[in-house]
Image (tube, helix red, strand yellow):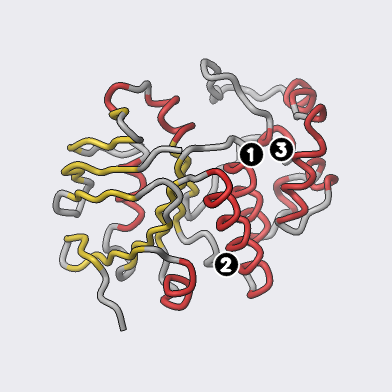
Amino acid sequence: MPSLRLQQLRPRLLEPVSLTLAAGALGFVSGPSGAGKSLLLRAIADLDPNDGEVFLGDQARSSVAAPDWRRRVGLLPAESGWWAETVAPHFARRSAGAERTHGPVDEDARHRQRPRQQDQELDALLRRFGFEADVLDWTVLRLSTGERQRLALARLLWLHPQALLLDEATANLDPANRSAVEAVVEDYRRRRGAAVLWASHDPEQRARLGDVAWVIREHRLVPEEGP
C-alpha cells in the first residue's frame, strides 16, 4: 500500500498543511471542537473546496477522477450517510465507473446486488464488529447511533481502501465496542499496509495506538508534544 502525503493542502479554516504518513502508519489529529479536524479530512478526500495537493504514493490526487480517489482514500465521517431502507444495499460493491444516483431507489434491485457470493468474507467482517449476518436485512431506522457508526466503518473496510480517514470513529461507542473497532482498524492497517489518519479527542487512544500525532492550534497543524 502507498503512503499518504499532503503538500501545502489548505482546507477551510486552516493554514497550509504538509505531512507524510507512511504506508501502514496510524496518525492522530486532535484539537478543540470546531478547530478544523473534520474539514482537514474532508479536504484530503476532496469533498470540500481546498488548495494544494495530496499524493497516494506517487500518484497525485489531481490526476485521479474524484470518485476513484474517494474509493482509494476512504473517509468515515462523524455522521455516516444511509441512502437505502435496509442495510444490505450499502454493502454492494460498485464497479469503478458506477456511482450512486440520488433518484428513486429500487430496493429490490439493490437487495439483489448484495454480495451473497462473498458471504464468508462479509460475515467474518460483520462479526468482528459484533453483528450477525442478518444485520444486512435490518432497516436502517432500527439502528442505534453506535450501530450505525460500526456498520459505516465495516462498509468502508468492505471496499478495501488504500488509506483511511477516520473522524471520531469511536466517539459514540461503549468500551467493549470501542476496543473491537480499534482492533479491526489495527488489523486492517497492519495486514493491508494502509495509512490511517484518525481525528480523535481521546488522548489515551492516541497514546495507545498512534505512531505519530498532530494537534490543531490557532489554525495550524503542528506535531503534538509528548507528556
Q: What residue sits 28% from the left and 57% below the top?
A: 36
Q: Which mark is residue 158?
A: 1
What residue occupies the far top of the structure in this picture?
Answer: 97
Question: Looking at this view, is 173 or 193 the one in front?
Answer: 193
Q: Nearer the viewer, residue 158 or 106?
A: 158
Q: Residue at x 74, y 24 (%)?
A: 113
Mark 3 residue type? Glu
Give the residue at x 43% y 70%: 206
What amino acid is found at the position of numbered circle 1 in the picture?
Trp
Earlier residue among tags 3 and 2: 3
Going by the image, does 81 lie left or right of 15? right
Residue 84 lies in what quarter of the image?
Answer: top right
Q: Is residue 59 left or right of residue 161?
A: left
User: CA gap, disc 3 to disc 2?
Assistant: 22 Å
Percent from the top left, x then y, of residue 213? 33, 65
Nearest the eye: 145 or 219: 219
SS at mark 3?
Answer: loop
Q: Which residue is mark 3?
A: 85
Q: What is the number of the mark on residue 172?
A: 2
Residue at position x 48%, y 73% in the image: 208
Q: Nearer the viewer, mark 3 or mark 2?
A: 2
Marks 1 and 3, how far apart at CA: 19 Å
Which is nearer the N-term, disc 1 or disc 3? 3
Q: Nearer the viewer, mark 1 or mark 2?
A: 1
